[in-house]
Image (cartoon, rainbow, N blue to C red):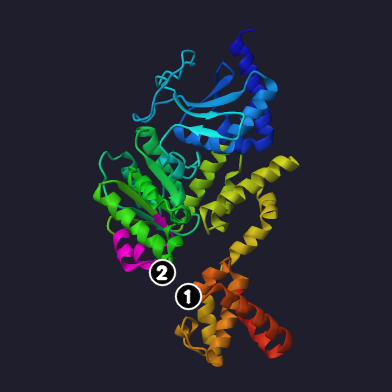
Amino acid sequence: MSVQGSLDQQWARVRGRLKDEVGETAYRSWLKPLTVGSLDGGQLRILVPTRFMRDWIRTHYADRIRALFSGENPGVQSVEIVVASAAKPDLTVTPANDAPAAPPAAKPEPVTELVIEPSPALVVVEDRTDEMSAPLDPRFTFENFVVGKPNELAFAAARRVADAQAVPFNPLFLYGGVGLGKTHLMHAIAWAIRKKDPSRRVIYLSAEKFMYQFIRALRFKDTMAFKEQFRSVDVLMIDDVQFISGKDSTQEEFFHTFNALVDQNRQVIISADKSPSDLEGMEERLRSRLGWGLVADIHPTTYELRLGILGQKADRIGAKVPPKVLEFLAHKITSNVRELEGALNRIVAHAELVGRAITLESAQDVLHDLLRASNRRVTIEEIQKKVAEHFNIRLADMSSARRARAVARPRQVAMYLAKQLTQRSLPEIGRKFGDRDHTTVMHAVRKVDELCGTDPAFAEDVELLRRMLEG
């Protein structure tokens, strides 16, 4: 048997071990596309299709690959990760003589960028710009995004930015509720740009990660490197920008980074749960800058869009789901796409595990808890309004600074009911009540619990309000 044939067999066994360790989903997304190259002087070459995938493999799986391959073949002393596709022109290209042929669509141009030795030390030969970027989900592409009336503007804008040679509008600001597709579109833009022009430097990360990187730069007195890395990119994508609300120093740095990139005609793409003008705790000048370009909102899904999403999801996972079940789910689960897809996954998994066909009755049984929760979703605004009416106070008092008992007690009841009847976190509830701290909400919950146990009339009031809101 040839040396290459032997390597291929060893690699097949290594991949089998990896698949058992990480699971089917992670294996299919990250490890299945890898191929084994050559073994030269104890150094094994592993080929990956993209630079992004090389980064991810290096961070999460490279050490394990080396360990497993050394177990199969003691001659493997180190592993070299090689990108077997077009790379940035400013990187050193060192193709090996025995590099395997790339697919016909692209001439192989391997880039030696990472060597993993048996010792813990890593030798990296590249600029660190892409290390700042968060991983992209391979499922989140334009091809997998179902377009409907609620999201057609956001989709068209995202597609335009991804395809345009010049910056069409700056920034592109996408906003909408949880699970409606903002992050999907952000990932799709990044994938499309990288596929079209791998030389363009794209950074995608959450606002929280941006803040962490900035604080880290301050701590290690490395702010100049931080500024250079972020301001030298071609496309900067910040997800969930609302998380830097109230963080003055982070907002200051983000403001200057934003301005520097716009001045250089670099593309900036932002997402949030609200429009720029409605972002609380954000500096006025930053809110103004964020609204400069195109602001595109994603509305709650319609029945037709939900049905289309379910149909595509079922096709993608190869599940045979009766149309009546898909229609039932589209009617019943209206909150967000994430919950909708989760419900379909549960139904399919249940059918496979118990060996029964998917029916309307089985779907109702499997999703009984989710369907019950979806039947009635109470908002904090509804709670505040109902409690204010019941105790005969002004709605504005729910957010006011007044501390009189006649106002404070109903406010505590509203906070208590918000904690019991919504999925909102304590900080989110506090913000709805005049930007109060989460500890204030915790105190209100404890106080109402205590009063319900000692004052039957008060407990009856709270129970009445609960039934009115749930009814």
Q: Is residue 371 above or below residue 100?
A: below
In contact (CB < 8 Å): disc 1 and disc 2 = yes
What's the distance in space between the residues labelled 1 and 2, CA to CA? 9 Å
- Residue 435 - label: 1
Residue 281 is tagged as 2
Element marked by disc 2 = loop
Residue 209 placed where, x, y %?
A: 47, 53
Q: Residue at x 45, y 33 (%)?
A: 51
Classed neighbour count for the residue bearing mark 2: other residues with Cα under 10 Å, few (<14), some (14–19), many (≥20)? some
- The quadrant in which residue 70 appears is top right
Q: Residue at x 54, y 34 (%)?
A: 122
Q: Is residue 278 magenta?
A: yes
Q: Quadrant of the N terminus?
A: top right
Mark 1 residue element:
loop
Give how far across and how far down residue 252 sits, in percent.
36, 61
Q: Is residue 33 magenta?
A: no
Of all residues, the one furthest to the top in this rendering is 1
Q: Does 84 appear above or below 302?
A: above
217 sits left or right of 4 in the view:
left
- Of marks 1 and 2, which one's residue comes earlier in the chain? 2
Residue 226 x/y as whole percent = 39, 49
